[in-house]
Image: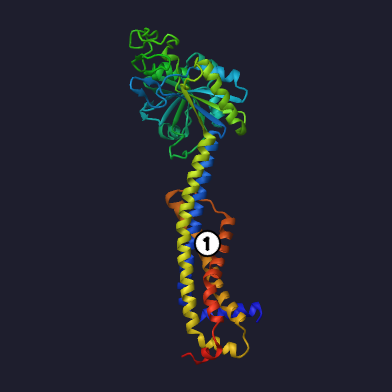
């Protein structure tokens, strides 16, 4: 029998009981649909994560203060005050694998007031102009602040699109005067829209100003523990005049280490953000920064660093590995349902062999070989799985689009995955249809003709 004849005969046999054929395909439809939906959602999440990381800069390094030693152990990472503006200068001058360096002073919970509008930005950042280059963040309107404005601690700021929407009603805020913690600021620029980051936080809900202005006019002196002193000093945030709680020249503690110096706390910064010259130079830049900062902080050999460096590329790799593992877990669950569908195919094909025993015997009696019988039942199983696979692919893609429109989750269609799913469904038809087909081909024609 020719291939076309076998396919025609298989379709004719399946069409005798269309309801049973559709119910048989249902397991394959659900299995393939689940695979497509999970893979599209997983790949969409992975692509969104990579896009967010690239928007931060895949060659970005963030230098954080370390954990100061206190009686009884260490405090949490980042609680020390070990980073200074001079560290930025040293990194910029001595690290050949570094392109941009930005000091960071963070603040939150501050009211942003314009007229009768009051808004609390998610974050107020003090930095320099290199920050926008590191983050690859363009100014859509107006301009950024200059080094002269940083040196003079001028009250200028750049705002994100969420601030424009919530405070200014979508109108241009450039040249407007606003208040942040009772300090008047002039808005000189608007940032391009970034959207939410991979943690779901709105990156456009931000105000960025010169770090010197934020440190000395807004946050005041940072309260904490310097890594080169065992004393602590409490200050009044926002106070900028002597006699109001700001210790510009703290008294030396009696138990001050003899080999270190007391650093005035208002000169310290919260973080340093660095951009390597290229993604493949991130590790080299990290090694250079470590050497430069250890030298600048007078750390003897064998002593722990009073800072730590976060590598966004390593973080992206770890996060990608996590999402891949979660995707594989979801895929495994979907494949289980596909196997269940394959078992259903085998069950129905065995029933079909039993019901068509006399037909099989008659065909063998008129000259059909065991191979012809095997081929026909195998083709019937493959047709069931192939049609179920096509319906599952369409349904799975539709389900992913519904999730995207309903929940806003990112999805990414992939033709290769769809082709692979179709191939898998066909293979399921071969694997689970082989035994019923083989059993049909092994029937004795005489016994089959006698079957009632």
Using the rendered image of the protein, determine whether residue 25 is visible from the camera's viewpoint.
yes
Residue 386, x across and y down, in percent: 55, 68
Relative to 438, 228 lies left or right: left
Relative to 314, 119 lies left or right: left
Relative to 78, 372 lies left or right: right
What kind of colouring is applied to the model shown?
rainbow
Of all residues, the one furthest to the front in this rendering is 302
* Front in this rendered view, residue 56 or 421: 421
Of all residues, the one furthest to the right in this rendering is 2
Quadrant hosting residue 235: top left
> Secondary structure under badge 1?
helix
218 is higher (above) or lower (below) than 279: above
219 is higher (above) or lower (below) than 388: above
Residue 418, x across and y down, in percent: 56, 59
Q: Residues within 10 Å of mark 1 (few under 14, many from 20)?
A: many
* Front in this rendered view, residue 424 or 201: 424
Q: In the image, what residue occupies the spot 46% across and 21% down?
A: 306
Using the rendered image of the protein, determine whether residue 114 is visible from the camera's viewpoint.
no
Considering the image in quadrants, where does the N terminus appear?
bottom right
Pointer 1 residue: 393
162 is higher (above) or lower (below) than 407: above
* Number of marks in picture: 1
Residue 278, x across and y down, in percent: 62, 31
Residue 234, x across and y down, in percent: 33, 15
* Front in this rendered view, residue 55 or 67: 67
């Amino acid at each position: 029998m020719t291939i076309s004849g076998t396919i025609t005969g298989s379709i004719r046999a399946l069409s005798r009981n269309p309801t049973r054929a559709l119910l048989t395909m249902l397991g394959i439809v659900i299995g393939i649909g689940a695979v497509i939906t999970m893979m599209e959602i997983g790949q969409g999440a992975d692509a969104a994560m990579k896009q967010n990381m690239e928007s931060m800069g895949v060659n970005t390094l963030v230098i954080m203060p370390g954990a100061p030693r206190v009686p009884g152990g260490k405090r949490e990472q980042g609680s020390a005050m070990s980073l200074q503006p001079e560290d930025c200068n040293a990194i910029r001058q001595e690290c050949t694998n570094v392109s941009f360096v930005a000091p960071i002073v963070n603040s939150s919970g501050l009211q942003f007031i314009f007229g009768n509008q009051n808004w609390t930005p998610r974050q107020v950042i003090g930095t320099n102009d290199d920050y926008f280059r590191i983050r690859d963040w363009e100014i859509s309107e107006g301009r950024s602040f200059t080094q002269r404005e940083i040196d003079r601690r001028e009250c200028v700021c750049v705002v994100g699109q969420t601030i424009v929407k919530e405070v200014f009603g979508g109108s241009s805020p450039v040249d407007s005067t606003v208040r942040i913690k009772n300090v008047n600021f002039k808005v000189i620029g608007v940032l391009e829209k970034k959207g939410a980051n991979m943690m779901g936080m709105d990156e456009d809900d931000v105000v960025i100003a010169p770090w010197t202005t934020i440190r000395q006019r807004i946050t005041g002196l940072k309260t904490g523990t310097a890594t080169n002193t065992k004393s602590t000093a409490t200050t009044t945030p926002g106070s900028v005049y002597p006699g109001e709680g700001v210790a510009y020249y703290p008294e030396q503690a009696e138990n001050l280490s003899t080999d270190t110096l007391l650093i005035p706390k208002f000169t310290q910064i919260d973080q340093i953000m660095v951009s390597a010259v290229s993604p493949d130079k991130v590790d080299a830049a990290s090694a250079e920064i470590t050497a430069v900062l250890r030298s600048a902080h007078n750390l003897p050999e064998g002593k722990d660093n009073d800072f730590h460096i976060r590598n966004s590329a390593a973080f992206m790799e770890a996060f990608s590995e996590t999402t891949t593992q979660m995707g594989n877990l979801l895929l495994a669950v979907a494949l289980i349902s596909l196997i269940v569908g394959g078992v259903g195919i085998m069950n129905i094909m065995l029933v079909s062999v039993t019901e068509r025993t006399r037909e099989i015997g008659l065909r063998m009696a008129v000259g059909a070989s065991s191979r012809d019988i095997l081929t026909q039942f195998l083709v019937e199983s493959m047709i069931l799985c192939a049609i179920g696979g096509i319906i599952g692919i369409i349904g799975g893609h539709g389900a992913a689009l519904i999730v995207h429109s309903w929940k806003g989750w990112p999805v990414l269609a992939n033709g290769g995955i769809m082709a692979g799913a179709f191939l898998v469904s066909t293979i399921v038809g071969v694997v689970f249809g082989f035994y019923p087909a083989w059993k049909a081909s092994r029937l004795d024609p005489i016994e089959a003709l006698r079957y009632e």
